[in-house]
Image (cartoon, coloured by chain):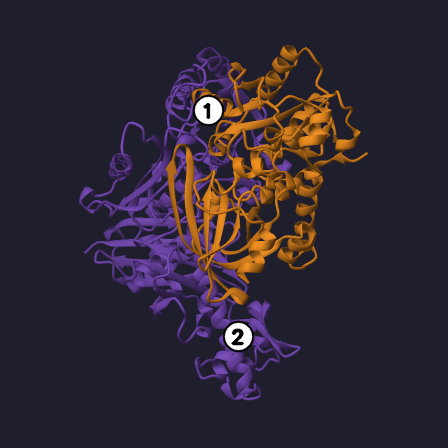
Chain colours: A purple, B orange
């Protein structure tokens, strides 16, 4: 029997699980997340290995989902000095790189940027030939002055030739220096993709240190035969030596792991996940076992990016949400007693009516001292509960893409407040072990490949273009380590380009598969 | 004399995106260009139409092409000046001021950037009072003003001077040139006199956009209902409130056509609204009855935040309020209806003003 070790770092807790090769849970632990993050990871790792009592060399895969990179951007600490090279001239001169960034973050990476002739049109033609001479000059100038380089060219998601060539020149002039290419990071939308590329370049050192110390710690515990993976925020994995080049892809992997874990625990491949905490609830969508991605621009540490993120909607409803009556109308929050629920909620001897108290009063949950909620008027409780359920139903409906009812998976400590039927929901699942859904999500993660291209439908049909994109995505997934027999298309969309004749359409496809072996 | 500062740019961007009736693109890139230009060259003087001398040379500045290309291939910033300078040379006259061609996310912002950088005033008027997809769909066209001489410029340094026999030829030639030049270009078009603007322009549109944006911003800041604030400041008709169901899109001839089905909520529960669009919203049909058509404005906003939603951004599940706003009187003339009425867009429906339609539907 071989095993997998999955670890996921959250804001409050660092969770670890060990599962066997048939994906059955063997051991689970929850330890507090530490300030430096790493020592908490090591504690969780040690404890879960002890708990499982299996020979550590029997672990064949380890997966880590961590917040190191997010923290570094937010704290502006330990970031690399980055040179930004944008291949676009004469286009794009009207907006400089890092426009709109928080000044401290700009300063932390040392705003050094260059605009060079190069880049492509939407149909793949060159805007101007790549100015190789200029790039050589820049490389000479940068020697010893920066730690990392970001290369961005216009329409590189369609044609990445210039980015790759510029990288070759830099390597030949500067030797080994980390280079981030924008076509590997984001999609169409130059500024947002450029921002994500620069952030990635800035995180390279942190990613290396984190990965190295994790691998060392595993060795110390005797986990010597495992392939080490780092979790991405789309629910798939990167091999550790690959991951050190793409640290930005790990941002927000926590909620993703939680959604994937919920899907795994409940065996639901298409549905809604509702994660109810103390103060807020997150609603996410599972499509073919993967979280749906947001199509909007997202901010990371005050920087606008178009970098993929799980699509979540948060509502101000949790176990500790305060319920009150105002002019005959029942108000649900948005304020909450939060972590003080064990002192302030009625069932725990406090004096505030919370969502949890309502659930206990109606006999839907059994927690604390239920005698203490008898003072709540039954009619009031019923109306409050109805309102809570309406809030949840509306949030779920906002996230759905069609009218068809979907199964709902309930996770999170506050989920006891949800009980009864919900409009648009076919069935409610409350899986066991939901408390470690995120570490499980890490342990069961797959590997994937992605394509984002603009196709001209004047020389091919839409279906031919989709086929081409699907083929490219599958090839990518196999390159990333997926077992070819298990690779399937997990996401696809096409959006026609407005105001342009020629029927250009943008196609995005993602394929994923299980780890080989 | 009023000046456009950074805050006003933010407000105009929201207001103009609203008046874009679902089209006109996302204002983000244009807004950054305008903000950067104002930071560097100072606030832009906003001129009332009455302040322009009759013989002054006025040139509208605009972006033409796909907003999706604009956000990737950002302008060099020089194109529009090359277009301006070439047109100036050809006309042999100094340009007195610039003016927006339409109210929309992108083209409300470009003229501000041009005005700031060229140190020209911006005129508080435009040629649509909303957004439309084609070059001849402006009130200037209704008054017989020619779109040409017109200059199209790309970031590479190419410029094209067009002289055409009519404004439909201009649209056709310019649209094709746009594709060849890379899908997003800058244009200097409809050169006209101060007298022309007074006669054919839609007045106070910049101020109006700013007021709409400001009303939404203040309502959100003060925890008031932003949709109510929007209705109040525009005097528009709340046509419908509902949840978006199916959205169907298809591309024909370079334009994205489609429709969204909206299921009523609150006071509209049990009702259904069909929203047809071709980049912009064209016609709204409530339970089989036409509730509004072009050229009246049919605007979709988020039901909670009042933030405008473009037709590209329509998604299942969004809660939206659809607002109908009477268009400028100039569009309600026979030539106006012929140019941008429902029949021009292929709907076998008479144009009836939205204020009358609303009474019939209720």
Q: Residues within 10 Å of mark 2 (few under 14, many from 20)?
A: many
Q: Identify which residue is drawn at 62% across, 15% down.
A: B87
Residue assigned mark 1: B172
Q: Position of residue B332 (x, y in %)?
A: 60, 42
Give yes or no for contact between labels 2 and 1 (Cβ–Cβ under 8 Å): no
Give residue A467's quadrant in the image: top left
Q: Is residue A20 left or right of residue A152?
A: left
* Residue A46 visible in image: no
Judging from the image, mark 1 belongs to the subunit labelled B
Report whether mark 2 lies on the same chain as mark 1. Answer: no
B253 relative to B176, above or below: below
Q: Nearer the viewer, residue B222 or B180?
A: B180
Q: Disc 2 and disc 1: Cα gap in Å?
A: 62 Å
- Residue A502 position, x and y percent, is 37, 28
Secondary structure beneath label 1: helix
Q: Closer to us: mark 2 or mark 1? A: 1
In the rendered structure, the answer to whether residue A468 lies left or right of residue A199 reads left
Q: Quadrant of residue A508?
A: top left
Splitting the image into 4 quarters, where does residue B182 fall? top left
Q: Chain of mark 2?
A: A
Image quarter hosting the C terminus of chain B:
bottom right
Q: Position of residue A53 (x, y in %)?
A: 28, 61
Q: Foreground: B69 or B53? A: B53
**Residue sitting at the far right:** B1
- Looking at the picture, how far across and down is residue A401, in whole percent? 39, 55
Callout 2: SS: helix
Nearer to the camera, A64 or B161: B161
- Please give the name of the residue rendered at 53% of the width and 29% of the height, measured from the top-left corner: B135
Q: Which residue is mark 2?
A: A355
Above or below for A223 versus A502? below
Q: Residues within 10 Å of mark 1 (few under 14, many from 20)?
A: few
Is residue A265 in view from this perspective?
yes
């Amino acid at each position: 029997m071989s095993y997998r070790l999955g670890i996921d770092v959250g804001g409050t807790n660092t969770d670890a699980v060990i599962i066997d090769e048939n994906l059955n849970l063997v051991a689970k632990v929850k330890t507090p997340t530490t300030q430096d993050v790493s020592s908490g990871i090591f504690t969780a790792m040690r404890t879960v290995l002890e708990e499982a009592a299996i020979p550590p060399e029997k672990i064949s895969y380890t997966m880590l989902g961590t917040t190191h990179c997010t923290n570094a951007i937010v704290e502006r600490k330990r970031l690399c000095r980055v040179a930004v090279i944008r291949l676009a001239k004469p286009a794009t001169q009207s907006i400089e790189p890092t426009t709109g960034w928080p000044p401290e973050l700009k300063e932390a990476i040392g705003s050094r940027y260059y605009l060079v002739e190069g880049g492509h049109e939407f149909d793949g033609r060159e805007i101007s030939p790549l100015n190789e001479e200029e790039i050589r000059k820049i490389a000479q100038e940068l020697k010893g002055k920066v730690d990392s380089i970001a290369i961005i060219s216009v329409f590189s998601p369609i044609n990445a030739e210039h980015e790759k060539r510029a990288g070759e020149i830099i390597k030949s002039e500067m030797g080994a220096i980390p280079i981030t290419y924008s076509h590997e990071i984001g999609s169409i939308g130059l500024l947002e993709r450029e921002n994500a590329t620069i952030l990635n370049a800035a995180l390279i050192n942190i990613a290396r240190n984190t990965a190295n110390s994790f691998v060392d710690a595993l060795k110390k515990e005797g986990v010597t035969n495992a392939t080490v993976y780092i979790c991405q925020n789309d629910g798939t994995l990167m091999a550790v030596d690959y991951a050190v080049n793409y640290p930005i892809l790990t941002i927000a992997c926590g909620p993703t792991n939680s959604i994937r874990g919920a899907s795994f625990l409940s065996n639901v491949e298409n549905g809604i996940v509702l994660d109810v905490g103390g103060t807020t609830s997150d609603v996410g969508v599972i499509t073919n076992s993967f979280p749906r991605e947001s199509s909007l621009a997202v901010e990371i540490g005050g920087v606008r990016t178009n970098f993929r993120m799980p699509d979540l909607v948060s509502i101000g409803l949790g176990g500790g949400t305060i319920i009150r009556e105002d002019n005959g109308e029942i108000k649900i929050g948005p304020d909450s007693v939060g972590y003080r629920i064990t002192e302030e909620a009625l069932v725990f001897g406090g004096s505030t009516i919370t969502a949890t108290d309502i659930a206990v009063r109606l006999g839907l949950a059994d927690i604390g001292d239920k005698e203490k909620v008898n003072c709540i008027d039954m009619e009031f409780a019923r109306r409050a509960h109805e309102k809570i359920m309406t809030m949840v139903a509306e949030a779920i409906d906002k996230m759905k893409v069609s009218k068809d009812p979907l199964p709902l998976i309930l996770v999170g400590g506050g989920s006891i407040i949800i009980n009864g039927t919900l409009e648009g929901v076919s069935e409610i699942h409350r899986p066991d072990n939901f408390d470690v859904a995120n570490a499980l999500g890490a342990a069961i993660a797959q590997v994937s490949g992605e394509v984002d291209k603009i196709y001209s439908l004047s020389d091919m049909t839409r279906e031919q273009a989709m086929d081409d994109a699907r083929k490219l995505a599958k090839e990518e997934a196999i390159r990333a380590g997926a077992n070819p027999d298990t690779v399937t298309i997990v996401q696809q969309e096409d959006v026609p380009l407005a105001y342009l004749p020629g029927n250009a359409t943008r196609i995005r496809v993602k394929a994923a598969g299980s780890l080989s072996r | 004399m009023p000046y456009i500062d950074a805050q006003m740019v933010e407000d105009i961007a929201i207001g103009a995106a609203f008046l874009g009736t679902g089209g006109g693109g996302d204002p983000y890139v244009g807004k950054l260009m305008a903000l950067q230009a104002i930071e560097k060259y100072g606030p832009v003087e906003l001129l009332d139409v009455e302040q322009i001398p009759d013989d002054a040379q006025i040139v509208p500045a605009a972006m033409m092409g796909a907003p999706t290309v604009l956000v990737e291939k950002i302008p060099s910033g020089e194109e529009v000046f090359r277009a301006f300078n070439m047109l100036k040379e050809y006309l042999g006259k100094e340009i007195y001021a610039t003016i927006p061609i339409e109210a929309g996310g992108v083209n409300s912002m470009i003229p501000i950037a041009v005005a700031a950088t060229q140190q020209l005033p911006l005129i508080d008027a435009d040629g649509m009072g909303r957004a439309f997809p084609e070059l001849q769909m402006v009130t200037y066209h209704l008054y017989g003003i020619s779109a040409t001489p017109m200059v199209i410029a790309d970031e590479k340094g190419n410029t094209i001077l067009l002289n055409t026999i009519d404004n439909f030829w201009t649209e056709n030639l310019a649209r094709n040139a746009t594709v060849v030049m890379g899908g997003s270009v800058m244009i200097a078009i409809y050169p006209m006199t101060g007298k022309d603007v007074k006669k054919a322009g839609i007045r106070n549109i910049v101020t109006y956009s700013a007021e709409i944006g400001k009303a939404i911003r203040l309502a959100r800041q003060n925890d008031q209902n932003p949709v109510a604030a929007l209705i109040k400041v525009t005097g528009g008709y709340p046509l419908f409130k509902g949840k978006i169901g199916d959205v169907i899109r298809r591309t024909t001839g370079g334009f994205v056509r489609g429709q969204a089905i909206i299921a009523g909520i609150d006071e509209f529960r049990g009702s259904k609204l069909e929203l047809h669009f071709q980049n912009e919203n064209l016609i709204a049909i409530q339970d089989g009855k036409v509730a509004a058509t072009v050229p009246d404005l049919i605007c979709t906003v988020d039901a909670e935040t009042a933030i405008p939603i473009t037709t590209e951004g329509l998604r299942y599940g969004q809660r939206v309020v659809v607002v109908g706003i009477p268009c400028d009187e100039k569009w309600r003339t026979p030539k106006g209806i012929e140019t941008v009425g429902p029949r021009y867009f292929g709907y076998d429906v008479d144009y009836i003003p939205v204020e009358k339609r609303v009474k019939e539907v209720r």
